[in-house]
Image (cartoon, rainbow, N blue to C red):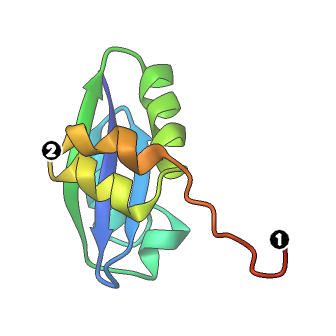
Amino acid sequence: MAWMYILKCVDDSYYVGSTKNLEIRLSQHQKGVGAKYTSKRLPVELVYSEEYNRVVEAFNREKQVQNWSRAKREALINNKTELLPALAKKKFKKNPLVE
């Protein structure tokens, strides 16, 4: 089995990762050896996880979610998946210098 997971860091940022052993990986993060990013933002809290049959599936999902906005990640964390399509749309600001 494998997992894609989201941690909430002490600075209120999110970290997205994947692993074959979620329990061990969380322990590593809490000890400051899980990732450079989380080691400077301890403690961390597991706020979301998805289980997969294959590591490659969890890794691919990790890469997908890493590219998401904070709002989209929070919709996933809060199980508001109906909001995901609207949050995926790019919002373009109109350039006031261009007519």
In this view, the residue farthest toward the top is 53
Residue 23 appears in the figure: no
Residue 60's place in the image compared with 76, above or below, is above
Q: Position of residue 81 (x, y in %)?
A: 23, 39
List the residue tagged with mark 2: 79
Report crowding for label 2: few under 14, some 14 to 19, many 20 or more residues within 10 A (C-alpha).
few
Question: With 2 as the anchor, is 64 left or right in this view?
Answer: right
Residue 22 appears in the figure: yes
Q: Amino acid at mark 1?
A: Glu
Q: SS class of the residue under badge 1?
A: loop
User: At 39% from the left edge and 38% from the top edge, which residue is drawn?
Assistant: 19
The mark lying in front, picked from 1 and 2, is 1
List the residue tagged with mark 1: 99
In this view, the residue farthest toward the right is 98
Residue 71, image quadrant: bottom left
User: At 75% from the left edge and 81% from the top edge, which residue is drawn?
Assistant: 96
Residue 9's place in the image compared with 18, above or below, is below
Q: Nearer the viewer, residue 46 or 74?
A: 74
Q: Nearer the viewer, residue 61 or 94?
A: 94
User: At 32% from the left edge and 14% from the top edge, which residue is drawn?
Assistant: 53
Residue 61: mark in rendering: none
Residue 57's place in the image compared with 17, above or below, is above
Q: Quadrant of the C terminus?
A: bottom right
Question: With 94 as the anchor, is 90 left or right in this view?
Answer: left
Q: Amino acid at mark 2?
A: Asn
Q: Nearer the viewer, residue 9 or 79?
A: 79
Q: Position of residue 1 (x, y in %)?
A: 29, 21
Q: SS class of the residue under badge 2?
A: loop
Q: Position of residue 95 (x, y in %)?
A: 75, 74
Question: With 5 as the anchor, is 69 left or right in this view?
Answer: right
Q: Nearer the viewer, residue 26 or 99?
A: 99
